[in-house]
Amino acid sequence: MTTSAEPPAEDRTDDPAPPRRSYRWLKILAVATALLVLAFAGGVYYLYQRLDGNITTDTVTETELKVHASERPTAGPTSAENILLLGSDNRGDGNEKYGEDSGTQRSDTAILLHLAADRHSATAMSIPRDLMAHVPSCAKPNGGKTEPKLEQFNWAFQFGGAACTIRTVEDMTGIRIDHHLIVDFSGFKKIVNAINGVDVCLADPVHDTKAHLDLPAGRQTLNGEQALGYVRARHGFGDGSDTERMDRQQGFLGSLFSKVSSNGVLLNPTKVYPVLSAATSSLTADPGLDSLSELYGLARDIQKIPAGQLRFLTVPREQYTLDHNRDQLVQPAADQLFTALRDDIAVTVTPDGKSEGSDASDGSDSGKSGSTGTPSPGSTPTAGGKQATPPPTYRGRTADADICGKA
C-alpha cells in the first residue's frame, strides 16, 4: 500500500490567514473616524449655540405691543413681511466716544423693510428722524407713561423704546409691523469689518472730526469705524441735511448688499461665521427673529432677491410749515406709498423721482419730498386681484446702482 507524499510547503495553494495586526489598524481607524465626526459635530453645535445665545430677545416690546393689540393694524392678506430696522445710538457699552451717555438711546436710522410675498422683491423705506408724527401715549422704560403728542419721529424711540416706535409707524402708515431688529454702533462696525469693508464713492474729500472721518474723494473701501462715521455724519457732507445722510445710508446699504451677494458670503462657512458672529453679538430682536435659524433664513431670503428688485427710498416729505428744521409728509404721495406696501404692490424708484419718459412734476422738491408724484401709466392689480391706481414713481435707488453713479 502506497501513500502519497505531502507536497512541499512552497507548492501549497491554501492562503494563509491575514495577520491580526491589519484588523487592529482597521478598528483603530474606525474609532478615530468616529471620534473626529463626533468632535466636528460637537464643534458645530457649540458654535451654533454660541451664535444663538448672542442674540438679545426683546420681550419688553412684545409685552407692550400685546397690551395695545386692539389698536394695531390687522395683518396683511399675504405672506409678505414688514420688518422695522432701527439703528440705536446708545452711548454706553463702549460707545462713549460718540457722545455723552445720557441714559437714553435714540434712533438715527429707522427703515421699514417690506419683503414681497413671493420674496422676489423688497422695498426699504427710510423714515426721517425729524419727521413730525403723532406719537401715542407710551410706557416709559423706568415706569410711567408719556403723553400723546405731535412730535418729531425719533422722540418715540428715545422716550418709549421700540414698542412706541412701532406703534408710531403703524399709526402713520397703517402697515402692520411683523418683526423688528435693533443694531447698535459696535454691531454695525463688526458687520462691516467681517466682510472686509464696504465700497463708497465721495464727490469731495471729507474731513469731519466729529464723525472721525478723514477721507479722500473717489471710490474707496471703508472699514467699520469709517463706515459708521459715513452713515451717521451730517455736517461734513454737502449741505449737512438729513436728506443727504439718508441718501448715503441707502447707497451704503445697497453696496453692502452687493458685497455680501457677490462674495457668496452666506454660502461659505468660513466667511459666514464672522458675519453671523458680528451680527448676533449686538443685535436685539423680537421673539420671532431671535434665533440663528430665523435670522439666517431672513438673510437667505434677502440674498436671493435680484439687486435690481431691492429698492431704497425715503418716505415723501417736505419742510414742516411751523418749523423748517422739521419735516412733514407730502400727500397724497405718502399715503399712496403706504397703500402700495400694505397691498404688496411693487413701487418704482428713479434717481430723480420721475417716471421714464415723463418730465411732469407736482412742483414739490424731489430732494426733500422723495417723490415728484409722477404717476406711472396703467393700473396695477392688488393682492386680491382688483385694479388699483399705481403709486407715483419715487425718488430712490436700487441695490444694483453703481456707488459712483456710473452706468
Image (cartoon, rainbow, N blue to C red):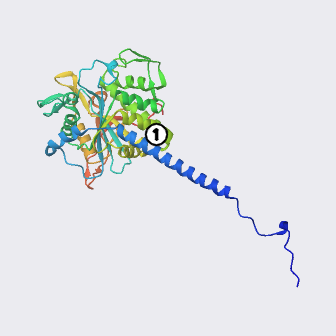
Viewer-nearest residue: 37 or 219 = 37
Q: Which residue is mark 1?
A: 272
Choose top left, top right, bottom left or bottom right for residue 292: top left
In front here: 115 or 54?
54
Q: Position of residue 395 (x, y in %)?
A: 33, 34
Q: Which residue is pictured at 45% across the width and 32% down the height?
A: 194
Q: Quadrant of residue 128?
A: top left
| Residue 288 horizontal/vertical position (percent) | 29, 45
Q: Height in image: 94 above or below 267? A: above
- Front residue of 208/342: it is 208
The residue furthest right is 2
The percent coordinates of residue 43 (x first, y second) are: 47, 43
Which quadrant of the view contains residue 170?
top left
Q: Look at label 1 and name its amino acid.
A: Val
Q: Helix or strand or loop: what does disc 1 sit on?
A: helix
In the rendered image, the vertical position of residue 143 relative to residue 63, given as above or below: above
Q: Is residue 263 left or right of residue 363?
A: right
Residue at 67% from the left image edge and 56% from the top image edge = 22
Q: Is residue 211 visible?
A: yes
Residue 397 seen anywhere in this rendered image of the structure: no
User: Hey, which residue is sitting farthest front in the picture?
Assistant: 1
